[in-house]
Amino acid sequence: MRRREAVLLLVSAAVLADEVILVRAFSIGLWHHFAYMVISIALLGFGASGTLLAVLARQKTRLGGRAGGTEWLAAFAVLFAVTFPLAFALIQKIPFDPFLIVWDRRQLLYLGCYYLVMFVPFFAAATVIGIALIAESEQSPRLYFYNLVGSAAGAALAVGVLQIAQVEQAVLAAAALAQGAALFALLDVVANTSTRFRRQLAAVAVLVMAGLTLYFAASPPAVRISQYKGLSYALNLPGARLLATRSSAIGRVDVVASPAIRQAPGLSLVTPQEAAIPLQHGLFVDAEMAGAVTAFDGNTSALGYLDWMSTAAQYFVRPDSPRVCVLGAGGGASVLLALRHGARHVDAVELDGNVVRLLREPLRTFGGALYDRPDVSVHVAEGRAFLESAPAQWDVIDISLVDSFAAAAVGLGAVNESYLYTQEAFTTYLRHLRPAGVLAVTRWIRMPPRDELKLFATAIGALEGMGLRPADRLVLVRSWATATLLVKREPFTAGEMMALRRWAEERLFDMAYFPGMAAGEGNRFNVLERDSYAEATHALLSGGGGREVFFREYPFFVQPATDDRPYFFHFFRWRALPLMRSTAEVAWVPFVEWGYLILVATLVQAALLGGFLIALPLALLRREVPRRARGGRLPVFAYFFALGIGYMFVEMALIQRLVFFLANPIYAVAVVLAGLLLVSGLGSGWAARWVTQGQSMRRRASLAALAVAAIAVIYAFGLHPALVPLLGWPIGARVAVAFAVMLPLATMGMLFPLGLRDLGRARAELLPWAWAINGCASVVATSLATLLALGAGLTIVLLAAASCYAVAALMVRLWPPVAEPVIAES
Amino acid sequence: MNPITEPRSPILPRWRKLGTRSALSLLTLAAAFLFAKNDEESFRKLREEMVRTQLASWRFGVDAVRDSLVLEAFRQVPRHRFVAEELVPHAYEDRPLPIGYGQTISQPYIVAKMTELVEPRKGHRALEIGTGSGYQAAILSRLVADVYTIEIIEPLGVTARERLTALGYKNVNVRTGDGYYGWPEKAPFDSIVVTAAANHVPPPLIEQLKPGGRLVVPIGNPFQTQRLVLVTKGGKGPRDIRVQDIMAVRFVPLISESGGK
């Protein structure tokens, strides 16, 4: 391996690690959507570097050849190594608060500062990679191999470091990679030059980097947490103390003690004094409230308050001493509730191991060793996957408020996938119920209603799929703040209904739906101007045409989520916009789903800036290229554009599919990101062997693109059904399966470098352009893929990817012919 | 000639000097006063404008605030005195304003709607949980006999108390601390405004509501009130309680007139 290849490897690793780490940092400080917004701009640095390279090429700077561009390479490698940690420290000083953005123009300025600050290091890194690839386009498959393998290592490394260290420390680790790259690049300069000046310059660069490392090692820049996040608020409460902080790649968990913390979502207004809430510690995930740990001394009679929330409804219809499964156990409220109702055994499933560990230590005494009781089994797993592979059956399956109120209220989760609330998931839950068992799902209420209606529709879909009549098997209880849906496999009995109605009435909860209800019965205590629940549940149960009309006309998207479109939180409908404008009495706020709008904003800004970055090198080239040589650019443009879009579509769809299969978002992102890059790297390396054998590249590229298209089509239809039966396998085996799934996609890694290599022979002046187009396309594709998945599903995303590759296969055949002099040179 | 004038002559110019000086300073004072008055005058106009355009008129998707006493209170209370200096130019715009500690002063319409919903009357006693800047308390103080307000974040509570005292709102009592248990010594209350939204309404507050009393709580985050929940207590005992969802809250910046003039 040459020094330049080491530079490429390390820079690629650092860039990918940075991305992963930044998403984490933004999730803690602000909300993760802004990470994608900022990173998408930063990644346009790849497009911009193409523009710069076009300029450099125009200035007749020596970029070509083995030693070409060595100094530029070193300069940008140093720039990257220096500006990355600086940028991270700097953005923590910018007082950006997204919620102010609609009122305060200064916030736009701050956001602009974020963009600018994060753009510089990514631009520098992209330029390093670009120079390395373009300077030796003949070698690009081999170089691209190092690029991809480096990226793969970076992704894996970042996740590994985040698992054991805080995000601030992970930044330093990534910075170290960048500095390593800079050192190799400087060595290359020193080895290739004899002038003292350059040696001195290199020494200064090394000193600056060393100084910076020392400075940040001594005082790592802390992530600034927005004052509008729950954790900041809680820490301002009287007597607030931060008891513990744990960090992993899944999220940061904080525990805050304050006598003023009381978590009892939708507690009945008439809760008697003797059912007062015991002392609680607040549990915060990524600085947002995610439940509480309740003081517990083993005496469940002190937990009366739990019975005064809608989340307890299931215990008034269940068999005695039930076996209970709690998905998303968190701080343990639902586990306590189960114990209070005499559960024989509770299976508590929690995704974040840190939450479980915190309850074991240091909160063991406070929380009554809840997760160490013989009648409670804790499983650190994703809920859906746990149930898919569990052989057992339960009397109660409880899924209560697994996301925070703050995030739910403004629709921040709108674009997040969740396999917990899909129709297939509900079918699985029902299959894991004993005959008299009950599934209970609670969500926060928003007005106009949406979450609970989608739940209702999902349950109907699942019951109908099992050949059961939904109208007899559903109950919807609502307080002013929460709604709990109960689903049974057997019809609710008259006795059960009586007990439940008495229970609800005592608490002033409304029975929004129950079998055999009469008009007006569901709108007694929490009064809506219009009983939209009665209308909606009636329409949904009416089946056939009525249901379709309701889905079509309701201002929110409330059709059940499926495993193919696992976006339960996606309620936004563009079609409803005119309706909102014309309807008086309807407020705007309740319709705004921030997550979705931010995604759209991300796409728009990336498309605009990306277009600009493509147009610029194009304009520069225009003056450069003699008129007769201008033809044939469109196929080149289309080829690299299609590759950029197609690759990201495949990556995104695979991540979503494997999130389900690996049952852990972090494993999935790490495995898919690293795995896909790695196999692409292998493909690239393979292609490099063809090149030395002097094969015709275009035919091969075309065939490889067709192969990718074929694989994408097969995966679109066959992957999910093939993976579901393997869910029960141990994680190691599943990771191996995931790699096996990705291996054929090695062909994806051949296309870009083969294209570069051939372009270098045919039209070398178009190389920077190809680099810019590909960079911009992949940025635009990231948000586009999510929008497409939300609107049409993952199958369609994969099919779209397949068509991109088919287009690429066609386009490469239409490229301009190889120019004779270039061949002579090589 | 006149001996008296002799010693006087040095004095006279001095007097004159003094006179000029005082005249000058008087002039400045007067000017300042005038400007201040002008300032106050312009703020008064802004308030009038705010009441007319944001509160009293029917706008797209919004119920106007009809209670004339409530509107009068908004004409009187100087909202610009409840925000930080750099936000004064925005004080009468149709938007919430940050007041630090992750808290805001809600947009005028929300404050007005909440005030109207609790139906404040002259002899009433009102409780507010979450003083914040003190603006809502000041509005209530124009409408009821006594206002009791509790702020959990101490620095906010202290500032609000000083501000309300300085502005002469004598019937507002500010306490810093946890508002969960209300203000039992002064209970029961005719109206309760819970400006700090929580995951539940503290049952002790419902207990401290008079029969016929009204409690309102906004749901959302500090910058977006999504709905108002109104709790009314009837005369038939402690369980005679009704909750209503009030939807007439809209999202200004996406429609028009954001950002001010």
Image (cartoon, rainbow, N blue to C red):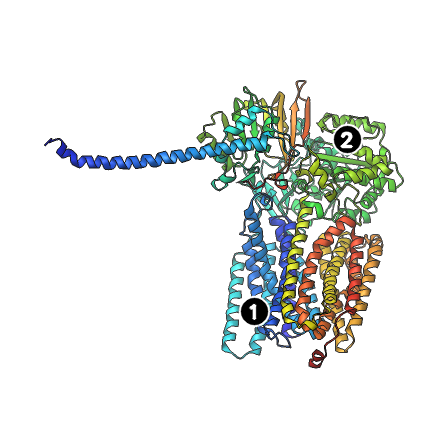
Q: Which residue does the numbered mark 1 point to in the structure image?
A: A75
Q: Nearer the viewer, residue B18 or A673?
A: B18
Give the answer, above or below, for where A528 lies relative to A674: above
Residue B211 horizontal side relative to residue A396, left or right: left
For label 1, the SS is helix
Residue found farthest to the left: B1
Q: Quadrant of residue B96?
A: top right
What x and y, as percent, mark residue A490? 87, 35
Q: Which residue does the numbered mark 2 point to in the structure image?
A: A512
Q: Nearer the viewer, residue A85 or A242?
A: A85
For label 2, the SS is strand
Residue A43 appears anywhere in the view: no
Q: Nearer the viewer, residue A329 or B199?
A: B199
**Kind of residue indicated by mark 2:** Ala
Q: Residue at x 75, y 77 (%)?
A: A692
What x and y, as percent, mark residue A285? 65, 46
Q: What's the chain of the residue with tag 2?
A: A
Residue found farthest to the bottom: A824
Q: Earlier in the sequence, mark 1 or mark 2?
A: 1
Residue found farthest to the right: A467
How many angstroms separate mark 1 from mark 2 (CA)? 66 Å
Residue A139 horizontal side relative to residue B3, left or right: right
What x and y, as percent, mark residue B249? 64, 34
Q: Residue at x 60, y 75 (%)?
A: A62
- Quick check: do tags 1 and 2 share a chain? yes
Residue A521 horizontal side relative to residue B240, left or right: right
Q: Nearer the viewer, residue A442 or B84?
A: B84
Q: Which mark is residue A200?
A: none
**Kind of residue indicated by mark 1:** Ala
Give the answer, above or below, for where A76 lies relative to B15: below
Give the answer, above or below, for where A480 lies relative to A71: above
Residue B52 appears anywhere in the view: yes
